[in-house]
Image (cartoon, rainbow, N blue to C red):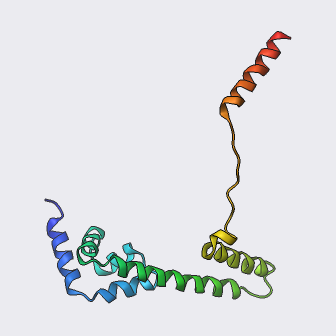
């Protein structure tokens, strides 16, 4: 089968490295594709290795830590906009609003609108209009 030799060598490489190397990369915001590129392995091999080793929970925790780091960076970026920039307050507000929506969507998230449209009645109304116009 094509790719089996490469996949096997990738899995051997993954078995030889410290799993904390992968979680460390993910914690620093690298994507799975970036991790694979850095290690010279295929995504398929990494997926198999994660499943075989039961590494899913470690990956999830690393992603949570990376997300927390990115949130802190987002606030720093919004707060470090030059004071003479007239949109600085707006960026600071929007960043905090965005974070509040994500952290507490029930309280601060956008509420779904209750719009109900009955297509059948719209079609009937249109037919009635046509009938009235034809009668005139």
Q: Nearer the viewer, residue 124 or 17?
A: 124
Give the residue at the far top of this rendering.
135
Quick check: 14 left or right of 83? left
Q: In percent of the image, x 61 and y 76: which residue is there?
A: 103
| Residue 2 higher or lower than 106, as above or below | above
Quick check: 25 left or right of 40? right
- Picture quadrant where residue 133 is located: top right
- Picture quadrant where residue 89 is located: bottom right
Q: Nearer the viewer, residue 50 or 86?
A: 50
Horizontal and vertical percent position of residue 55: 30, 79
Q: In percent of the image, x 73 and y 21: which residue is there?
A: 127
Quick check: 77 left or right of 86? left
All told, the count of numbered labels is 0
Q: Quadrant of the C terminus?
A: top right
Horizontal and vertical percent position of residue 14: 23, 81
- Picture quadrant where residue 120 is located: top right
Horizontal and vertical percent position of residue 90: 77, 76
| Residue 29 higher or lower than 1, as above or below | below
Q: In percent of the image, x 71 and y 47: which residue is there?
A: 115
Q: Nearer the viewer, residue 15 or 113?
A: 113
Give the residue at the far right of this rendering.
136
Q: In percent of the image, x 42 and y 75: which residue is there?
A: 31
Quick check: 58 left or right of 115? left
Horizontal and vertical percent position of residue 129: 79, 21
Q: Quadrant of the N terminus?
A: bottom left
């Amino acid at each position: 089968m094509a790719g089996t030799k490469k996949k096997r060598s990738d899995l051997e490489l993954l078995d030889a490295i410290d799993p904390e190397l992968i979680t460390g990369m993910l914690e620093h915001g690298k994507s799975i594709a970036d991790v694979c590129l850095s290690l010279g392995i295929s995504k398929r091999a990494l997926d198999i290795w994660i499943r075989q080793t039961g590494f899913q929970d470690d990956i999830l925790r690393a992603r949570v830590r990376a997300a927390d780091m990115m949130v802190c960076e987002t606030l720093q970026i919004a707060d470090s906009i030059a004071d003479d920039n007239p949109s600085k307050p707006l960026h600071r507000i929007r960043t905090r609003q965005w974070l509040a929506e994500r952290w507490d969507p029930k309280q601060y998230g956008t509420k779904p609108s209750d719009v109900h449209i009955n297509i059948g009645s719209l079609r009937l109304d249109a037919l009635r209009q046509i009938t009235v116009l034809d009668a005139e």
